[in-house]
Amino acid sequence: MTKSHLPSRREAIKKLGIVGAAAVLPAVTAAAVSEGAASENTETSPGVPANSQGRAAFREELKRRIDATPLVDSHEHLCDEQERFHGSKSWANLLQHYFSDDFVSAGLDWGSVWGEQAQKDDPVELWRRIEPYWFAVKNTGYGQAARIAIRELFGINRLEESVIPELQKRYEENLTPGLYDRVLKQHANIESCQVDRGPYYESRHPELLLHDINIVGMMTTDSMRDISSRVGTTVKTLADCHEAIRLFFKKYAPYATAVKSQIAYSRGLDFDQVSPERAEEPFQKKWEGKPVTPEEVKLLQDHLFWFCVQQADEHHLPVKLHTGYYVGNNSMPLSRLSQNPAQMTDLCLRSKKTRWVFMHTCYPYSRELIAIAKQFSNAHVQTCWAWIIDPLGTKNFLKQYLVTAPANKIHVFGGDYGTVENVLGHSRITRNGVFAALAELVEEDYLEQDDALELVEPLLRGNARRIFDLETKYHAAQHVPWQ
């Protein structure tokens, strides 16, 4: 789509009106009110008096600051822009990542919508398969993120059969160079994204799309052949595996923002300290394709996990761990998830110098995460993904966190999407949630107005810049060797 087809935030609000925008674009809150009633100046201003007139002025100022402050996006799964243009060009891409899970929960056979042949079908026919379930899922966090993106990027306020051809046309026109800058920077006001794609991805947009080192394939050995080939070594023994991991960290740690593991999808976070001697035999059996017992698998994973954590510590990289809720359907064992918080405290105790970053608020065990952040100085909190899993629950989580645990250890945004358009929708929901949380804390006399205003920059940007040392990473991104 050409720029002329992409309404700006100001144009979107002008068409909808302030009240309409508040109703249908929840996270446009800051833009909707501030652009109509507040100065464009992004400099901070003094606190406002606590009276009825001052209360209104405070809310206006809070909205303005939240909208004007760039977001640091601490978790995505975005491919590089050029790769995006080679994939499916169906408008239903906007419903695929995460939102499809809600459709499945509502009873839709998503394979009939999104199978290989279905993607080539008429766009209207796709909608006809989806439409019977639309009312059931359109108001979930996943649904709101997609609807906000469609409204702001394509100017379509309501999905129904008559608008699908135009949506398909505008969606395809939008797939042009500059897509990521338009969506992430111009519309979402995102400073940079931290992306998880494999062990480490050499992005062609290294200053916008910074990447994490993902260690799951190192722990399971599934990606060790790729890793060893990228650093020019041959792996035959556990010691060779250690050396390949060392060299991989040496090569990519200067540009990486963190170490990431999502192994909690397949096991608990109960990592014991296992010596190389005990891990050697399980490694050899696994490497040679011989049968290994569950006990041997755990021994090897535990050993390699702590080896990777040691590398993270040596290279001053935080360690991000998936905790809590599972993507997908009909597979989440709450009996295992319920143990995540206790296992997280064990990690904090076992490696006190590691900066642990616990992702997704450990939903639905979020209160326990607040207790962990309050107790342990090396525990940090990400609300990435959580705002679209449970928007109101995450707002309440933030409220409780801010009056319970240190405010310098939480960063509030990570879209966690593979589809860039939906990152915009998620960012709007996040800004709206942060506004609601801070405004309610003031109204309920838990925060002074000045206190709430001071929290905006660290929550949206400052904490993440410090925790992930982003100034250093931005400088390194200007000199990546693969460009």
Image (tube, rainbow, N blue to C red):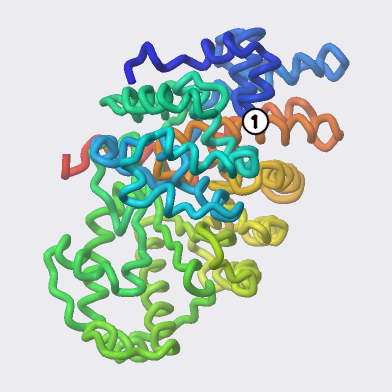
Residue 365, compared with residue 103, is above or below; it is: below
Q: Residue 356 in the image: state x and y as whole percent.
A: 52, 59
The answer to whether residue 341 shows anywhere in this view is yes
The picture quadrant where one finds residue 310 is: bottom left
* Residue under the point 40% across and 48% down: 114
Q: Nearer the viewer, residue 58 or 4?
A: 4
Give the side of residue 250 with respect to residue 180, left or right.
left
The picture quadrant where one finds residue 153 is: top left
Residue 446, compared with residue 317, is above or below; it is: above
Residue 385, compared with residue 353, is above or below; it is: above
The answer to whether residue 382 shows anywhere in this view is no
Residue under circle 1? 432
> What SS does tag 1 mark?
helix
Q: Residue 203 in the image: state x and y as whole percent.
A: 25, 43
Q: Residue 271 in the image: state x and y as whole percent.
A: 49, 77
Q: Nearer the viewer, residue 263 or 381?
A: 263
Which amino acid, mark 1? Asn
Q: Quadrant of the C terminus?
A: top left
Give the side of residue 408 with respect to residue 235, left or right.
right
